[in-house]
Image (cartoon, rainbow, N blue to C red):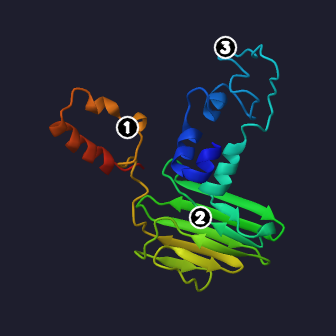
Amino acid sequence: MHRCLFFCADLGYHFLFNEGFPSWLYCINLGATTIWERWNTVLEDGTISKMGMNSLNHHSYGTIVQFMYEYIGGIKPAEPGFKVANIAPVPSMRFRYFNSAITTAAGKYVSNWKIAEDGKLTVELEVPFNGAANVALPRFSRERLNITGGNVDITDDGKATLPAGHYEISYMPAQDFRNIYSPQTRLAELPYLFYLGGTPETVLPVTEQIIALKRW
């Protein structure tokens, strides 16, 4: 998880939604409401593992929450004390919408996003009175662009610097977030049964159809 915090948000999403052992959802599916010290602190039959050091409320695997705030919500400090923040959310259709807020020494920063049924992305941002934010809008385009909350100068690559205020920015992403798969999708996540017994001539059309699928 520490590596994905710095290198690969998509891998972080994969870890977050994985239900196999070991994973956070594996524990949740066994009834966890807190983070355990071990992935198998509680066994599948409901008994406590006989291994030592089996806390049922432990911080050690809590980096997943850091990933949620810093990548899914995209809020990170740009200066000490969050005098200036960097906000660069990484949406995924796995959630459809996500709300995050961090109260800092400079005030509360908010980063919310939502993918509409037609694929339009809305990013809602709040910058505190004593702060500012460098914003990177994901897959930005000017198609159906709508901005509320003030005059915002956005570069063609989706960068903007926001003073204190409340903003809502909506647009059609340059690449549709509703697509379930892409050429970068891991083989383990593809519906590989479609490929069994396939030849190069039959696999390519199937791959194109899979990549064209949209989730809603």
Residue ID for mark 1: 190
Residue kind at label 2, given as amino acid type = Ala
Q: Which of the two residues, 120 or 7, is positioned nearer the viewer here?
A: 7
Residue 205, position as x, y percentages in the image: 20, 44
Residue ID for mark 2: 88
Residue at the left extreme, as displayed? 201
Residue kind at label 1, given as amino acid type = Leu
Residue ID for mark 3: 45
Q: Which of the two residues, 134 or 102, is positioned nearer the viewer here?
A: 134
**Mark 3 or mark 2: which comes first in sequence?**
3
Residue kind at label 3, given as amino acid type = Asp
- Which element is circle 1 on? loop
Query: Based on the displayed image, in which of its 4 quarters is residue 70 positioned?
Result: bottom right
- Which element is circle 3 on? loop
Image quadrant containing the N terminus: top right
Residue 161, position as x, y percentages in the image: 62, 79
Q: Residue at x 68, y 17 (%)?
A: 43
- Which element is circle 2 on? loop
Query: Based on the displayed image, in which of its 4 quarters is residue 153 positioned?
Result: bottom right
Q: Which of the two residues, 194 or 204, is positioned nearer the viewer here?
A: 204
**Mark 1 or mark 3: which comes first in sequence?**
3
